[in-house]
Image (cartoon, rainbow, N blue to C red):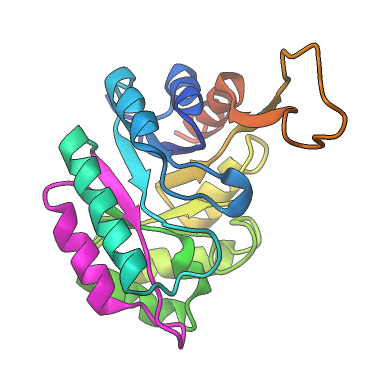
């Protein structure tokens, strides 16, 4: 029996995705470059994750860090990345684009949704950068997306919980509003209760220590520790949500 609240883990590598699965995640969002807000993972990362995961795999389609206003070259890259996700048998993609005035870029987003075909589609946190969140929500509904990932327009979901609750009411049964950003085992239950969100998104990241004994001191930051999703933290998030049932 599936849990009444779904836990998606934001994973910055295939190793993170496997840790998420081990910890009890219901779904993975896979990407690279966590420190820059996430970009599309490599083909090899996608292929290995698809081979090893038994839970649904959604893939972030974002060609670069920075804003969410994309030109024709970037649009072509995203379309090709979506085609690769379909070819590998991924369960869904995570997309989003804005026009220069802060509205949803409907022509481009329609192309991306159409390219996804039978795969599921999540609209990512480009939504939070939109000028008018209730109006943007109607546009995302019109695109046919399954869900929108949001922090309620704030830096983290705990601060945006009032807006998230309003978006949940507005969306009704038309799509799922998934709360994400800044969620921990200590606050995920409160955000779930107060917002009404039935899907929650967290990274559950921890520092992984380098096993290297030798480091070149001139290469500061190039060969040191890194962040990776942690199965124990995922399990703590899962337990926090399960305790609400």
The quarter of the rendered structure image containing the N terminus is: top left
| Residue at x 46% of width, y 66% of height | 126
The quarter of the rendered structure image containing the C terminus is: top left
Q: Position of residue 109 (x, y in %)?
A: 27, 69
Q: Considering depth in this image, is 204 or 108 the residue closer to the camera?
A: 108
- Residue 138 falls left or right of residue 187: left
Q: Is residue 193 above or below residue 154?
A: above
The residues colored magenta run 91-120
Residue at the farthest bottom position: 101
Residue 231 in view (yes/no): yes
Q: Is residue 194 above or below residue 68?
A: above
Q: Position of residue 170 (x, y in %)?
A: 35, 72
Q: Considering depth in this image, is 94 or 63 the residue closer to the camera?
A: 63
Residue 119 lies in magenta, yes or no?
yes
- Residue 210, picture quadrant: top right
Q: Is residue 223 above or below residue 9?
A: above
| Residue at x 60% of width, y 53% of height | 36
Residue at the farthest right position: 217
Residue 26 in view (yes/no): no
Q: Considering depth in this image, is 155 or 39 the residue closer to the camera?
A: 39
């Amino acid at each position: 029996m599936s849990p009444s609240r779904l836990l998606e883990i934001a994973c910055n590598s295939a190793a993170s995705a496997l840790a998420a699965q081990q910890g009890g995640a219901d779904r993975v969002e896979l990407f690279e470059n966590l420190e820059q807000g996430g970009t599309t993972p490599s083909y090899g990362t996608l292929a290995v994750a698809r081979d090893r995961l038994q839970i649904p795999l959604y893939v972030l389609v974002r060609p670069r860090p920075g804003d969410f206003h994309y030109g024709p070259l970037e649009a072509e890259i995203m379309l090709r990345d979506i085609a690769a996700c379909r070819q590998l048998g991924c369960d869904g993609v995570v997309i989003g684009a804005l026009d220069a005035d802060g509205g949803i870029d409907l022509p481009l987003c329609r192309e991306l949704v159409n390219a996804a075909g039978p795969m599921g589609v999540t609209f990512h946190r480009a939504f939070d950068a939109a000028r008018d969140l209730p109006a943007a929500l109607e546009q995302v509904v019109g695109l046919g997306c399954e869900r929108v990932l949001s922090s309620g327009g704030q830096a983290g979901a705990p601060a945006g919980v009032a807006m998230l609750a309003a978006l949940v009411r507005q969306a009704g049964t038309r799509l799922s509003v998934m709360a994400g950003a800044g969620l921990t085992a200590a606050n995920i239950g409160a955000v779930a209760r107060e917002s009404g969100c039935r899907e929650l998104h967290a990274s559950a990241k921890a520092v992984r220590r380098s096993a290297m004994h030798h480091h070149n001191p001139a290469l500061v930051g190039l060969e040191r520790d890194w962040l990776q999703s942690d199965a124990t933290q995922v399990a703590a998030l899962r337990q926090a949500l399960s305790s609400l049932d």
